Image (spheres, helix red, strand yellow):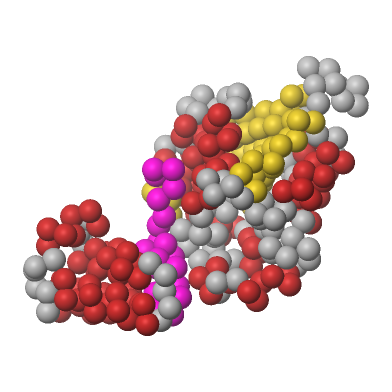
């Protein structure tokens, strides 16, 4: 069997399993099985599929047919042009999270940043890689997730500028920051059953839901952020696409100014940004 024949057969199997984008997934997994860069695979489609590679490919396709995400199968995800390690212990980064990165980079460059609930470190590591002079702190409740974040920081060359600590939101976090970012759990508990299996069954539940209305994390972050932001500092959080108004109200009630709900490329609410007042509770810049 040639690689082309194996690819077509695998794509048909994934389509039958209800996988959207079956052809692309099959291609990525075939490239992994045979050890060829995905963008070079076309040059080798006429080659015979070696027995060992065939066994590896069959195992990978079986995992995808069972609705395991490709990133979790491969153990990596490309985000903002960089490769990140992704394991069962962290959220599989979504393309829409790049909206937060874009908005952060469009604003003033901070001296220090804080990433709450960092998971794989996708936000902190990306921003530090784009801002070589900036230092950061990344927190998470999961020791396993923090280990992944630390490895991603090392791979991106920013480990010396990133402190990775175990913390429940702001607990144990000291100092003031110019920018706080977070992609917290925002799925309501009653929405969990309706999630795609790739998300519901393969991302850590702790990273998906607050076991309540999906807004608990925003209340905790907004309530504690003022004590950790320098006057004029920004707070940026990713949100569910129908949560814009609710999260904006939470930030305003906590004292934030210039609160904005920012859309993704499809026009859906995706990021809420607020600025901590320059003059607040007697604090002067």
Q: Position of residue 283 (x, y in %)?
A: 86, 22
Looking at the rendered image, the quarter that the N terminus falls into is: bottom left
Vertical arrangement, residue 165 with respect to residue 63, above or below: above
Quadrant of image for the C terminus = top right
Q: What is the residue that sits farthest to the front in this orientation?
A: 267
Q: Which residues are magenta?
A: 63-82
Q: Is residue 158 magenta?
A: no
Residue 187 picture location, percent across and down: 68, 63
Does the magenta run of residues contain 81?
yes
> In this view, which residue lies farthest toward the right?
282
Is residue 188 found left or right of 108 in the rendered image? Answer: right
Task: Looking at the picture, tell me which residue is in the foreground, 227 or 264.
Answer: 264
Identify the residue at image location x=22%, y=72%: 7
Is residue 285 visible in the rendered image? The answer is yes
Left/right placement of residue 170 relative to residue 2 reads right
Tell me how many marks there are: 0
Residue 28 coordinates in the image, percent (x, y)? 30, 63
Q: Is residue 190 above or below residue 143?
A: below
Q: Quadrant of residue 25?
A: bottom left
Up-down relation of residue 189 to residue 130 (above or below): below
Residue at coordinates 73% horizontally, 70% vertically from top-left? 189
Position above or below: 45 against 194: above
The residue sitting at 73% across, 65% down in the picture is 188
Residue drawn at x 9%, y 68% is 46
Nearest the viewer among 40 and 136 is 40
Looking at the image, the residue that sits furthest to the left is 47
Left or right of residue 280, residue 268 in this image? left
Tell me, yes or no, if residue 166 can be seen here.
no
């Amino acid at each position: 069997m040639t690689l082309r024949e194996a690819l077509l057969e695998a794509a048909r199997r994934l389509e039958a399993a209800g996988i959207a984008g079956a052809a692309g997934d099959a291609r990525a997994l075939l490239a992994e099985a045979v050890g060829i860069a995905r963008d070079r695979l076309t040059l080798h489609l006429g080659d015979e599929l070696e027995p060992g590679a065939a066994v590896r490919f069959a195992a990978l396709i079986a995992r995808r047919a069972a609705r395991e995400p490709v990133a979790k199968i491969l153990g990596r995800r490309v985000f903002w042009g960089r490769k990140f390690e992704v394991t069962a212990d962290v959220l599989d980064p979504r393309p829409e999270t790049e909206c937060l990165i874009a908005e952060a980079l469009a604003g003033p460059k901070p001296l220090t940043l804080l990433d709450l609930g960092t998971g794989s470190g996708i936000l902190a590591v990306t921003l530090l890689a784009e801002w070589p002079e900036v230092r950061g702190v990344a927190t998470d409740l999961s020791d396993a997730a923090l280990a992944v974040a630390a490895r991603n920081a090392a791979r991106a060359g920013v480990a010396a500028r990133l402190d990775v600590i175990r913390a429940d939101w702001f607990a144990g976090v000291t100092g003031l920051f110019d920018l706080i970012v977070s992609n917290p759990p925002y799925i309501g508990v009653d929405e969990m059953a309706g999630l795609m299996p790739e998300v519901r069954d393969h991302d850590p539940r702790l990273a998906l839901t607050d076991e309540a209305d999906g807004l608990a994390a925003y209340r905790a972050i907004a309530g504690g952020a003022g004590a950790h932001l320098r006057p004029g500092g920004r707070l940026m959080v990713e949100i569910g696409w129908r949560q814009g108004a609710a999260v904006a109200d939470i930030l305003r009630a906590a004292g934030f100014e210039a609160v904005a709900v920012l859309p993704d490329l499809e026009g859906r609410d995706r990021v809420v940004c607020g600025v901590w007042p320059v003059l607040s509770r007697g604090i002067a810049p």
